[in-house]
Amino acid sequence: MFNETVLKEIKQISGKYPTTRAALLPALYVAQREFGHLGADAYEAVSDVLGVPKAIARGVGTFYAMYKHKPMGRHIVQLCTNVSCMILGAEKLSDFLKNKYGLEPGGITPDGRFSLVIMECIGACGTAPAMLVNDDFYENLTEKYIEEILEKYK
Amino acid sequence: MITININGKEIKLEKSVTVLEAAKAAGIKIPTLCWHEQLGQYGGCRLCLVEIEKIPKLQTACTLMVTEGMVIRTETEQTAEARRGMLEFLLINHPLDCPICDKAGECELQDLVEKYGAISGRFREKKRKIPESFADPLIVRNMERCVMCTRCVRMCEGVQGASAIGVIDRGGHSHIEPFSGGRYDCEYCGNCISVCPVGAIMSRMHKHSYRPWQVTGKTETICPYCGVGCTLVLQVRDNTIKRVIPRIGSPVNNGLLCSRGRFGYEFVGSKERLTTPLIRKNGVLEEATWEEAISLVANKLSDIKAKSGSDAIAGIASPRCTNEDNYVFQKFMRTTIGTNNIDSTARMGFAGAQAFMENIFGQGATANIISGLANSDTVLVVGGDPTTANPIFGLQVRACSRKGGNILTVGQMKGLEYFNPVKADPFLYTEEVLLEGIVTALIGKKGLPGANLTLEAKIKDINTSLDDVEKKCGVPAKELARFVDILAASATPALLIGKEIVQSSGASYKLLLLSAINYLANGRIYLLSERSNEQGLLDMGCAPDLLPGYRPVASAEFRKRYETLWDTKLNEKTGLTIFEMMDAASRGSLKALYVMGENPAFNLPNSSAAATALRNLEFLVVQDIFLTETAKLADVVLPALSWAEKDGTFTNMERRIQRVRKAVNRGGMEDWRIISDISKNMGVKLNYADTEKVFHEIAAVSPLHRNLTYEDIEDGHAIYPYKGEPLRDVMEEILTSKGKAARSTGKLYLRIERPLFHSGTLSTKAPALVKIYSRAVARISAETAASLSLDEGDIVRITTKAGAIELPVSIDKAADSSTVMLTNNFEGQGAYSLMEYTIDPVTKTPVLEGVEAKIVKMTGT
Amino acid sequence: MEKVLLKNMENPNSADINEYKKIGGYKNIPKAFEFQPKEIIEEVKLSGLRGRGGAGFPVAMKWTFASAYPNFPKYLLCNADEGEPGTFKDRPILEKNPHLLIEGMVISGYAIGAEYGYIYLRGEYPHAKDVLNKAIAQAYDNGLLGDNIFNKGVRFHLTVHQGAGAYICGEETALIESLEGDKGQPRIKPPFPVNVGAFSKPTVVNNVETLSNVPYIIEVGSEAYSKIGSQECPGPKLYCVSGHVEKPGVYELPMGTVLRDIIYMHCGGIKGGKRLKAVIPGGATTPILPAEKIDCPMDFVNMPKHGSMLGSGAIIVMDESVCLVKVCYRILKFLEHESCGKCTPCREGTGWLRSILGRIENGEGAEGDIDLLLSVSGNMAGKTFCPLGDGAASVTQNFIKHFRNEFEEHIKRAKCVMRNE
Ligand SMILES: Cc1cc2nc3c(=O)[nH]c(=O)nc-3n(C[C@H](O)[C@H](O)[C@H](O)COP(=O)(O)O)c2cc1C
Ligand code: SF4
Ligand code: FES
C-alpha cells in the first residue's frame, strides 16, 4: 500500500486524464520510485489505487522496458548500443564497464551502487556513444570520461 | 445491399460485415486462430490472409470489411503460401509433442498444419524453452505450445471480467500467466481452457486419461448447480464423465461456464455415493434390498396415516431434482398420503420473494430473460453478489457495464468491483432506511405514475430524506443523490435481488420498497436463485399452499379441477412450511417425514435444532445420493440417481424449461420411480413409463405448462407460459412488516458467505472444487483481526447462542468490521448450525439477522 | 535559410517563456484566433505541410477528418516518442524550444477543435520532461493554456505523458493504447484515430516537428512557407546526422536537400577522410543506400524513387570500416526487442532473422543462409500487422540486395571479414 502522500500524488495525476486507467503508466513510475522495482506488492498497490486488475497492471508493466522487475543498483547506467553508438565504439565501452566495474547487462555491482542496462537508441546519436546515468545524459563517451562520470555517483 | 464475389461465387449481403463473416455466410471456411466467435477480431495470427482484387497486399479476412463489388479469393497459391509461412513461424518454437499432448485430435494448429502442410527443418536454433507449469491444482499451462492468439486473455478480461491472467513481457518473450506467475487466483471458470486452440492451457482433471476421439458419448444437459441453468456437454468414456464443456450457441451460457459447472462434476463418480438402500436396525443403518426398503416405507407410512392421519406426514422436495421428480413427489404427498405438507428449502428466500413480488406485479414479475440483462442501461444489485451466486448471470452484469451501462450496488459486491459500480454501502442492517431514502427521492424526481394504486397507497407517505440516510446508514447524501439520479434517468433499469435481503429482518417491507423502486424506475426484476431447479420445484407445486402451476390450495375451484384430473379427493388444509415441519416434529405432532434430495439437518438455520427435531420423528425416510447429515438420522435411506444418470427437465430462474439428459448408467432408480413404487405398495398407482410421460401429465395439469412437450423443450426456448395460461391475476392485499435493525456497535454479527466455488453439499463432494476452496474459514475484517490480535490462519472459536465451531480465520481488508462471514459448505462446520432465526410473518422466510457471535483465539494450535 | 525550428538555440535560456516571447513567440496564437478553425486548416493545406514523423501524411487532411467527425471532446496528441534509431531531431525542440511546440499545439488544437492535448514523450527523455512541464506551467501562468485562452473562449489543456521504453509506441495507434494505460500494441484500422482515437474520441496524432511548423505557417502565410524546400514537400526539415561524419548533429535545411550535400557540405564530409561505405538515410528501419547512391533529394516524394525513404530524416553515415552484416544484425536485434508480439510473423520472424544474422556475423553461417534470410523475410513482408514487422523484412532484404557480397564472404570465410585480427 502507498502512503497518503503518494496516494494523493496518484489521484492528482489521474485527474489529468478522462479515465483512471490512463494513469497506469505514470502510476507505475511512481510505484517504481517507491518500491525500487515492480514486484507483486508494487502492482497490488497500483491496482488498489486505480482499480485496474493486478494481472492487467502487471501485463502492461512488463511490456515496457523502463519498468524494472528486479532489484537495481542505486544508480542505473544506461548505455546505448544501437547503430550510431555501436559504430562509434559503444561495445568497447560495455566491455570496459564489465572489466573495470564488473557491470554486466542487467546485473548489479556487489556494493549495490550500479546496475547496467543496455539501451536501444536514446536519441543522442549525434554525440555518440552516449549513456544515461539515472536521468542525466552523458555524450561523446570515452573510457576515461566514463570513469569521471561514475565517480560522481556514490 | 452489397454484392461481393468470393471464390467466383456471387454473394449478396444486407450490410457490410467482415470478409470472414461474409465467407462464413457463403459456407466458405477461412482458417483462423486468433479470431473467435465469442471474442471477435484481433488480427494477430495472420492466418486468415486472403487475396482481394485491386489490393496489392494480402488482407486479413477477420478485420477487413467488405465493400460493394469486392472480389475475394480465399484459397490461392499465394494465400496457401502465406499460411504455410505463418504456420512455420508458429511451429519454430512449438514443441513437436503431439503424441503426448492431450489436445491432439482437437488442436486447431494441428488441423491447420494437416491442411496446409508445414515447411520444416529450416529453424536450426534452439527452441524457446518454458517448463510446463503445474503450480495450479486445476489448470496446467504449457507456454511452449502457446501461439499467442491471446484468446484466453481476451476471454478472461473481456468476457469473464476476472482479468486474472495477462500477457507478460513482449515480443518473442510474451507469455501468458496469472498474476502470481504460478497458481491462479481467479474465478476458475475455465473459459480460458475452452478457447485455447492448442494444448497450452488445459484442465488437469483429465490429463493423460483419454484422447478427444476416444469419447464414447457426448450428452447435452443442464448444470446441476445454480438457477441459471447453463447447458453442459458431458463427455463420457467408460461410463465415466471425463470432461464437461459448454456449447457455443446455447441459450443461457452460450459457450461459457463457471467453476461449479465445469469442474464440479466428479461427485457423480464419488466413492461416497450410496449404492444400496439402508434400513436402521437396532440403531444402526444396515444394507437392505430394494424390496425390503420399499415395503418398509410403504407400510410405515400407511400405518402412520391410519393411526395419526395424513397431516402427520410431511415431505421435503428438492431443488436439485427434476420437475418430473418433484411433480411425482408432490402428487404422492397430496394423493397417496393426502396432505399438503410439502415444502422445500426454496422457503429460505426464493419462494417467499417470488410470491410477494408476484402479488404486487402480477404474473411474470420475475421472469425476465437472463441474456437481456446486458442490454439494460442500469443494473441495481441488492442483497447478494450475482457473480458468485449465479456466476453466468453475473457475467451479464459485467457485460452491461462494458457496454456502458451503470452498475448500482447496495452493499459490497466484490465481483463487480472492477466494473465501476456506483456504491451505496450502508451500515450493517440499515438497508431499510437506505431503500426508503431511494423511494422518497425517486418519488420526488419522477412522481407517482398512477398505474398501481395498491402499491402507491403503501409507499406514498414514505418520507426519508437523503440526509436521514446519511445519518443512519453512513451513505453520504451526495453519493446517494448521484445513485438516485442515475436510476431515475434510466430507461431500461433492472433490479437484482439476492437472498440476503429476503433473509433479513423486515424482509417483506424491504421487498415492498424494492418493488416500489422497480415500479417507480420502470424496471425489471431478477431474483437470484441458488439451486438448479428452485423455480421448477415451485412450479410443480412443492409448496404447502400451491398446487402445480401456482393454483392456491385454498381455492375450492382450483382444488376441484385438480381432483378431477387426479381422480382423488384433495386435502383442503394448507400444509406446513419446512420450518413449521421442524416445529411440528419437535412437538411430536409430525410423525413421519419423507426427505427427497435435501439436507435439512445441514441446510436449515439452527441446523442442530433441526437435527434434534428430526430425531424426534417416528419415521424418517431420506432419499439422496450421499449419506448426508440428514440421511444419517434416517430410518430408511434410499439411494437416488444423480442428475447425470437420469432424464427430465429443470426450470431455470428465467422460467426456461430445459432438458436434463442421462449421460452415464447406474443401477438403481430415479427419484420419481422410487416414489411411484412406494405409492404402488401403498395401493395408489402412480404409473409412468418414463419422464416424458410424467411431463405429459404435467402439461395437462399445470395451466402454465399447458400442451408443452419435450419436443418443444428440445430447442431450448421453452419459457413458460409457452402455450399455457398466464399465472394468475389475483391481487391480494400487500402485507408487510417492518424490521428491527438490531445492531449495536462494537458487536460482531454472523453472516452467511456464499462463495463462488461451493453451494451446499454437492460441491464439497467434487474434489476439484475442494482443491480450489478446501475448508471453511471465518472471514473477518482487518480491524477485527487487529483488535483481537489475530493473524491469517489462526484458529478461533466462534460462539453464538445456537452453538460453537472452531475455524481458521481469513482476513479480508475490504470486509465490514462488524461482521464475521462463514460459508455453509463443509461437513461439521456449517455456518447454519450457529444461526438462530425467527420467521418473517409475511414471507415465511427465516430471518438470519442480528446473530451475535463471539470470537476467541484458540491457543496451542 | 532563416531558422524556423532551431531558432534561438544558442541562447542558454531558450526554454524560458520570456526569452521565447522576446523573439516574437506566442504572437501567432492571437493571430490564429482571428481566423475560423476551418481557415487555419485551409492555410495549412495550402502550405503543403506533411507530417514529419516518418510517413509524410498531409497534415491538413488528418485535421479535416478529425474536425469534421461529430464526437467530442477531441484530442491532439503530440508524438514525441522519437524512437527510430538514429533519430534525435525532436529532442532539441523538446529540450530547448518547448514553447514553439506548445504554441504549435494551441493553434493546431484550435484548428481541429481539440480541447485536450497530450505530449507522448519517450521515457528516455527525462530532461525534456522537466523542461516541458516547466514550460507548460509557464504557459498556464501566462494564460496561453487553459479554459479561456486570450479571452477568446478557446480551451486547450496540455499534459505530458511519459512513455516507458517501447519503440512501437511511436506508431500512432500503439501510442494511443499506451496513453490509455495499455500495452503499446497497434490497433486495427479502421476505425482511424481521426474518428475513433484516444478514449474513443476523434484524435489527431502529429509529430513534434510537424506541430512546430504550424506557428511559422501562421506567421508568414502559406504562400511564403510553401516556397521553402521542394515543391512536393515544402518547408524546413530537421536532418539529424550521426556516424562517421566530421560534424554530426541536427541540421535545419530546406526539405529536399540532397543527401550528398548534407553529408559533404553541411557535415564536413566523412570523418578522418575515410571512404564512405553506406548511408541509412531515414532512420534504422529505412532501406540502406550504398555510397554511390546518395545523390537523392531528401524528401518524401523523391526518396522512394531512389530506393529508400525519408523516414524521420535520421541519416546514419558509415565509413569503410563498418561491418554491414553486424549493422544489419544490430537493427534486427533492435526490432526483435521492440516487436510488440501481437502478430505472428513479426513476433517469430524478427528473432529468427536476428539469429541467422548473428550466426553469419559470428562465422557460423551456412550455405543457404542468405536464401533463408530472404525466404523468411519474404514470409513476413506485407503480412505483418503494422509497419514494424515489415521494416524488419525490408531492412534484411535491402542489406542483402546491396551488400550480398559481404554476407557471402562472411559465410565463406567463416568469420567476420571486417574484424581486424
Ligand atoms: C513502428 C513505427 C514507429 C514510429 N515511430 C514514430 C516516432 O517515434 N515519432 C513519430 O513522430 N512518428 C512515428 N511513427 C509514425 C506515426 O505512426 C505517425 O505517422 C506520426 O506520428 C504522425 O505524425 P505526423 O503526421 O506529424 O508525421 C512511427 C510509425 C511506426 C509504424
Ligand atoms: S508487426 Fe506485429 S508484432 Fe510487430 S510490432 Fe507490429 S503488430 Fe507488433
Ligand atoms: S484470424 Fe485473422 S488474423 Fe488471426
Image (cartoon, rainbow, N blue to C red):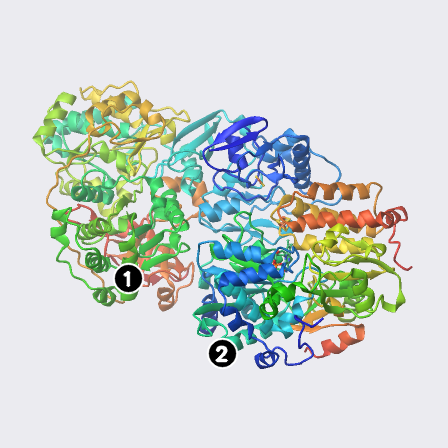
* Amino acid type at image mark 1: Leu
Numbered tag placed on residue C141 in the rendering: 2
Left/right of residue B470 with respect to residue C164 in the rendered view: left
Residue B647's image quarter? top left
Residue B191: percent from the left, percent from the top?
Answer: 47, 41
The chain that hosts pointer 2 is C
Mark 2 Cβ and ligand 1 under 8 Å apart: no
Near-viewer residue (C256 or C332):
C256
How far is mark 1 from mark 2, CA to CA? 38 Å
Residue at 47 percent across and 56 percent down: it is C201
Label 1 neighbour load within 10 Å: few <14, some 14-19, many 20+: many
Residue at 65 percent across and 40 percent down: it is B57
Q: Name the residue beneath numbered marker 1.
A: B480
- Helix, strand or loop at label 1? It is helix
Residue at 40 percent across and 33 percent down: it is B250
**Image vertical order of residue B389 relative to residue C318, above or below:** above
Near-viewer residue (B681 or A79):
A79
